């Protein structure tokens, strides 16, 4: 595939980091100190796709810290910011064009894989044990996948294999030029990065149960899953660990998020479902 060359210094820093890792953004792909790069990429994605999350369901890499402080203190000009966003739009359109003419897309979809982290498996395993047909789990606006077919990377025991509608692929690193002297020096020939849009207003992805592949489950994780089932933590009113209003924080503070049984929440879910099904295969993937 052809490769997109980024010219905006801000977008370059957000994705790759500063030259030789000396700039204040470490980059989404590597050493993203304080999540500046991720916050910027996720905000640009929300702007591009018109994503507005319900209160209390802010993505992990947004608000309270990150690129907003840099804007507030004048380290990024409005012109630099807008130029970066326009180039991000161009990158998405370029990615779509390249993918649609590649062999990676079959029937409008790309087969991708992802090894899951602990906060994800904690939500997923109880639902699998409970034999749910569809599984919900927390997701950022942008989720990192790969197309190399490798499962159980990084010492994880659960992975996802799913066919993703090509419209949801925001960035595919096979069609993004990798400059020299960047923090993520091993990206080409190393990790296979594909950034997938997750649009659900409550910060959850919803997939069929057969998308989840499992190796040996640690005994401690199985015991914790059984406790969560007994307490009903994964039903109706979801319990989240959060900080600064974020659903996906690694902090240990816990709180109940709005119940999906509430009629207002049900209306919001139905509206979002009807809108999003227009570009999916009938399953509410995001």
Image: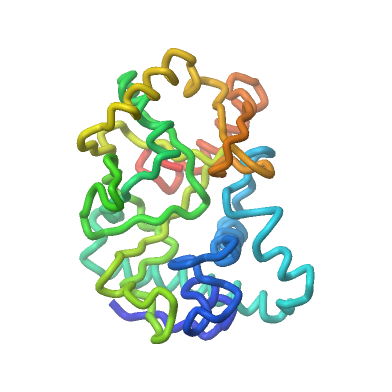
Q: Quadrant of residue 195?
A: bottom left
Q: Quadrant of residue 205?
A: top left
With 216 as the anchor, is 33 left or right in this view?
right
Q: Residue at x 78, y 76 (%)?
A: 74
Residue 225 % position (x, y): 38, 24
Q: Residue at x 66, y 65 (%)?
A: 67
With 34 as the anchor, is 223 left or right in this view?
left
Residue 171 % position (x, y): 42, 66
Q: Is residue 263 above or below residue 46?
A: above
Residue 176 % position (x, y): 38, 76
Q: Is residue 157 above or below residue 193?
A: above
With 6 as the anchor, is 265 left or right in this view?
right
The number of callouts visible is: 0
Q: Is residue 241 above or below residue 237?
A: below
Tell me, yes or no, if residue 19 can be seen here. yes
Tell me, yes or no, if residue 48 can be seen here. no
Q: Nearer the viewer, residue 48 or 114?
A: 114
Instruction: Work out which residue is located at the far right of the displayed protein and give it.
Output: 73
């Amino acid at each position: 595939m052809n490769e997109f060359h980024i010219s905006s210094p801000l977008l370059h820093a957000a994705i790759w980091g500063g030259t030789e890792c000396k700039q204040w953004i470490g980059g989404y792909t590597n050493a993203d100190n304080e999540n500046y790069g991720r916050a910027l990429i996720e905000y640009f994605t929300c702007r591009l796709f018109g994503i507005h999350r319900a209160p209390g369901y802010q993505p992990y890499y947004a608000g309270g810290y990150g690129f907003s402080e840099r804007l507030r203190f004048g380290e990024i000009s409005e012109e630099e910011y807008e130029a970066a966003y326009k180039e991000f739009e161009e990158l998405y359109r370029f990615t779509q064009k390249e993918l649609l003419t590649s062999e990676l897309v079959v029937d409008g979809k790309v087969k991708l894989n992802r090894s899951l982290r602990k906060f994800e498996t904690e939500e997923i395993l109880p639902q699998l044990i409970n034999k749910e047909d569809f599984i919900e789990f927390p997701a950022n606006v942008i989720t990192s996948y790969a197309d190399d077919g490798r499962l159980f990377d990084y010492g994880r025991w659960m992975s996802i294999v799913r066919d993703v509608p090509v419209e949801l692929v925001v960035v595919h690193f096979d069609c993004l030029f990798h400059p020299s002297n960047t923090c993520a020096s091993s990206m080409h020939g190393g990790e296979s990065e594909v950034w997938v849009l997750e649009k659900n207003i409550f910060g959850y992805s919803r997939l069929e149960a057969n998308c989840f592949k499992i190796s040996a489950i640690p005994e401690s994780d199985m015991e914790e899953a059984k406790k969560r089932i007994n307490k009903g933590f994964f039903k109706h009113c979801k319990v989240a660990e959060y900080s600064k209003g974020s659903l996906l924080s690694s902090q240990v503070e816990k709180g109940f998020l709005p119940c999906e049984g509430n009629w207002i929440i049900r209306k919001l879910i139905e509206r979002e479902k009807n809108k999003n099904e227009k570009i999916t295969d009938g399953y509410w993937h995001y």
